[in-house]
Image (cartoon, helix red, strand yellow):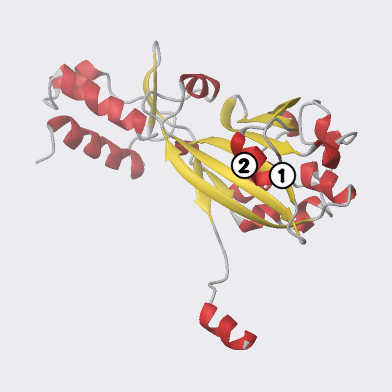
């Protein structure tokens, strides 16, 4: 049998999901629910904390507990990297997500810092570099309005990006078409990628940078980007506020049996 705070949290969550409590609306004060017989002060407090950890509400001193304003951003899978978006247009990946979600954006909602650093172990391994080799690290913080959504740090071999806009720390995407267009113009057309995702609790610095609610998790993304000949041209690590995204993938289902038959 679920504890009373869990039962209360589930009832309130259902009322939020069916629209009884609308985005931006304040939930009743704890004392009001106590007086209504919903449980003790500690029970209601625990229920509100659970809703906050699940990304349904935001609690702050002076404003109480308020239903989150927006549904999660749709983070596209394959479609966000469509070459037509960045090679022929100016729809870089984070903008593609906003367009797919029907949300507004400004290019300066991406800030960045560029530095030349010793390659962390997974970066060196992905690029096939020896220990102690240097890479360029292009670290971005992406926001939606005033709220941070995620960080993304891309690591490049110096010989691939030296003298390009990818090592220019000007806020926003790296010019028209962003980083993939810069690589394309430098002769490194991206061909395929590998993405790995896992959820974890944030570090204290990440919680502060992303303005996370207590108990809110993050999704860490590792992306390896290749040219057609297998050259790694980017290794990126992203940290996403878990409740601010939904992840969408659309792909053909493989049939390895047919592939094996055709190769014989």
Residue 112 lies in quadrant: top right
Q: Which residue is mark 2?
A: 103
Decide which of tag 1 and tag 2 comes sooner along the chain: 2
Q: Quadrant of the N terminus?
A: top left
Q: Nearer the viewer, residue 110 or 158?
A: 158
- Identify the secondary structure beneath mark 2: loop
Q: Which residue is located at x 63 percent, y 35 percent?
A: 152
Task: Tell me whether the residue at label 1 lies in contact with that at label 2, contact meaning CB atoms closer than 8 angstroms.
Answer: no
User: In the image, residue 219 lies at what x, y percent?
Assistant: 48, 39
Image coords of residue 209 (percent x, y): 55, 21
Asked if residue 56 lies left or right of residue 46, the reply is right
**Camera-side residue: 148 or 218?**
218
Residue at horizontal 18 percent and vertical 30 percent from the top: 5
Quadrant containing the C terminus is bottom right
Q: Is residue 239 left or right of residue 173?
A: left
The residue tagged with tag 1: helix, strand or loop? strand
- Taking 146 as reference, is 63 above or below it? above
- Picture quadrant of residue 42: top left
Residues at marks 1 and 2, CA–CA distance in whole angstroms: 28 Å
Which label number is shown at residue 115? Answer: none
* Residue wearing tag 1: 234
Residue positioned most to the left: 1
Q: Count numbered badges in the picture.
A: 2
Res. 175 in view = no
Q: Residue 218 location, x and y as percent?
A: 46, 35
Q: Nearer the viewer, residue 228 or 22?
A: 228
Q: Position of residue 77 (x, y in %)?
A: 59, 54
Q: Nearer the viewer, mark 1 or mark 2?
A: 1
């Amino acid at each position: 049998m679920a504890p009373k705070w869990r039962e209360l949290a589930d009832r309130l969550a259902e009322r939020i999901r069916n629209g009884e409590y609308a985005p931006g609306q304040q939930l009743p004060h704890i004392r009001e629910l106590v007086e209504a017989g919903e449980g003790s002060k500690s029970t209601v407090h625990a229920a509100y904390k659970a809703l906050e950890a699940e990304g349904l509400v935001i609690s702050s001193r002076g404003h109480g507990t308020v239903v989150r304003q927006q549904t999660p951003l749709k983070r596209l899978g394959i479609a966000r990297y469509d070459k037509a978006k960045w090679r022929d247009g100016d729809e870089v990946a984070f903008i593609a997500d906003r367009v797919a979600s029907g949300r507004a954006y400004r290019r300066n909602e991406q800030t960045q810092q560029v530095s030349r650093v010793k390659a962390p172990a997974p970066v060196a391994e992905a690029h096939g570099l020896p220990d102690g080799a240097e890479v360029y690290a292009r670290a971005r913080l992406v926001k939606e309005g005033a709220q941070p959504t995620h960080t993304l740090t891309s690591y490049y071999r110096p010989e691939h990006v030296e003298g390009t806009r990818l090592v220019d720390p000007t806020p926003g995407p790296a010019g028209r078409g962003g980083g993939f267009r810069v690589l394309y113009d430098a002769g490194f057309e991206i061909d395929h990628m590998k993405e790995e995702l896992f959820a974890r609790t944030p570090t204290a610095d990440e919680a502060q940078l992303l303005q996370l609610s207590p108990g809110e998790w993050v999704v860490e993304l590792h992306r390896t980007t290749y040219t057609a000949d297998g050259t790694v041209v980017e290794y990126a690590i992203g940290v996403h506020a878990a409740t601010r995204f939904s992840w969408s993938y659309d792909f053909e289902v493989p049939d390895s049996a047919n592939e094996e038959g055709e190769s014989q």
